[in-house]
Image (tube, grey):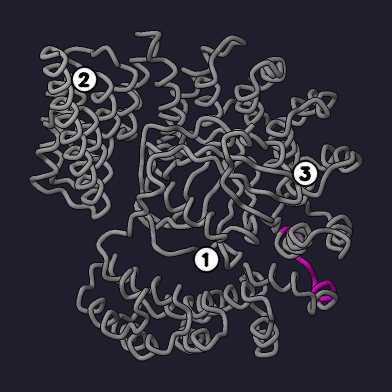
Amino acid sequence: MIRRRTLLFSALILFLALAFLFKDSANEYRIIKKLELQRRITPRLSAFLDHPIPFIRKAAFRAFYRIGHAHGASRYWAAFLEEKDPYIKNEALFGLRYFPALKPKLFQLLSEEPPENISLFYETFFFMAGPKDISLLFELLGTDERTDDVLFTALGNMAHSLDFSAEDKEEARSALLSLLGPELSRAYAYALSQWGIPPSREKDLPGLITLEDILRDYYYMSLLHDENSLKALLHDFDRFPALLKFRYLTQCARYPALRDFLYQRSLSSLELLPLLENENRLSLLKEYASPSYPSYLRETSFYGMLFRNKAGLDLINTFKDDALFLRAFSRNPDNYFFLLTPEWEQRLLGQNDHITRRNTYDALSRLHPGRKKEFAQAALEDPDFTVRLTGYLLLQDEPALFQKTLLNRYPEEPVRDLRYFLFDLIRQEGEKELTDKLLALEKDPELLSLMKQDTPPSFPKYRNRNWVILFRTAKGDIIMECFGDEAPHTVENIIRLVKGGFYSGISFHRVALNHVIQAGDPHGDGWGGSFPLIKAEYSPLSYREPGMVGIADRGKDTGSSQFFITLAPRPHLDGRYTLFAKIIKGMDTVYRIEPGDTIIEARILASKERL
């Protein structure tokens, strides 16, 4: 009996100790997350890098690199060198890319003793690389089979995001082409697709497109520019999955004969889009500008008439009262400067379409710089808040006038979105005196609370779960699984919006073929969003496959409700946009989404509904 009591007492003591430890760790984790969201590196956060509990150290490393302040680089590097847990060390290694000053130390470490996780070392190093590192990359290719795919990916990303001399470009192409063969990896194909291939070698590519590895085929297909090479694949068109079909249509679109062949097939409106984006024959453009086609095809056709065909006055007069024609015209009226008479200005600015008015004020200010103030003041009286925003932006060249206008108009601005956007714009520019004045003018208690917060509010009841969300559209269902551990705050915000019914009725306002579809803007044109703004949560997750879901933003820490779904591999987005989910069902629906398609319903799925 005594032994049993002793065991029970020991178990109770152990339970209480673990409970206390868990509670203490939970509090420490909350402190780390708060500092991360406030973008503050403090001595306390630095101390957490040496914490005995692994998940606390991991959270501290992640907070450090998401904040990314230069003054934290030395402390981060020292903790990275001391870290013994390989899993946490990899997380810390990924984060080094956000401290450019550490690049020489990373290279020195690589030179002295190549580590076991050398692939991640190279991935991190070349994320920070510049044009002068291209020769080093080629020296490393082939030295270790574990690293070649990483190096090829780095090579592709560098070509996508950096400027190189003609000599560097030729060196890269020659080195890549020397390896060309049917068994090479997706990463190699990606690198080749970014650097290009001489026309003399294109004849080898159609034979490499076997439909056995669709992503690799996608990269090879993006290299096809020769008409004969493309024609060789026409007989396979109906067998192509959506990913390859849209890439093929884009490649064929530059050739009238291939376009004519494809027009004869039963293409969807979305499949017609890349063909019309390259069409310059007036008869065809007029045909697809008819009201029987979707508005996005009609606008594309009108744009082709105006800027690829150089429409004459007769044609312009024929369509001058069509709202979509005027929107297309407003996008770039520079070639028709002679038309911008007071009558035409009134025609454009009198449209019900706010996009046309917004484009017109911007274009007129550019074409008539002496009248910029006049156009800005007129835009500030517009009923649409994005047009009023354009008016403010047109005044930014004159800071004194901008500040005076902003302070005079701010108290009467009815749209919270615009007041918050202007406040955030000023805050990001570091103008504390002006932000304090705006705070004093704000009368909405909820908005004022958001404006005063260093960090958005947390939604702890939704934390750290891999939620599954269904978006129902007329084209079918799209189901995404969220990454609750890698992007907890982003996921919490999305779940909060879904539960609140925010996404019901929201449209997919952007469809960029071979790139992304985008939704989440209640304004419907990419200029809107939700409150609060969400801090970026970068992680080692990758956009290397279609169907990855990221947060759209206008810079770090400016995301909210808008999200995008990748239609193709987009590895150059890695580490630049918060990746918070992936599509687990419904990619066929994703490829059918057209501009303007609406989310009928968004809801959280119970586990039994998910598949």
Q: Which residue is mark 2?
A: 85
Local SS, label 2: loop
Front of the two marks 2 and 1: 2
Residue 403 appears in the rendering: yes
Label located before the other in sequence (3 or 2): 2
Residue in front for this viewpoint, 307 or 360: 360
Local SS, label 3: helix
Name the amino acid type tagged 2: Asp
Q: Where is residue 272 drawn, in percent x and y?
A: 79, 47
Which residues make up the magenta segment?
308-316
In the picture, measured across the screen, residue 525 lies left or right of residue 375, that is right
Q: Dot 3: few (<14), some (14–19), or many (≥20) neighbours within 10 Å?
A: some
Residue 104 appears in the rendering: no
Q: Where is residue 288 drawn, in percent x and y?
A: 85, 57
Pointers 2 and 1 in contact (C-beta within 8 Å)? no
Name the amino acid type tagged 3: Glu
Residue at 76% across, 27% down = 240
Residue at 47% across, 64% down = 530
Q: Which residue is mark 3?
A: 271
Q: Which residue is mark 1?
A: 527
Front of the two marks 1 and 3: 1
Residue in front for this viewpoint, 253 or 5: 5
In the picture, measured across the screen, residue 329 lies left or right of residue 312, that is left
Label located before the other in sequence (2 or 1): 2
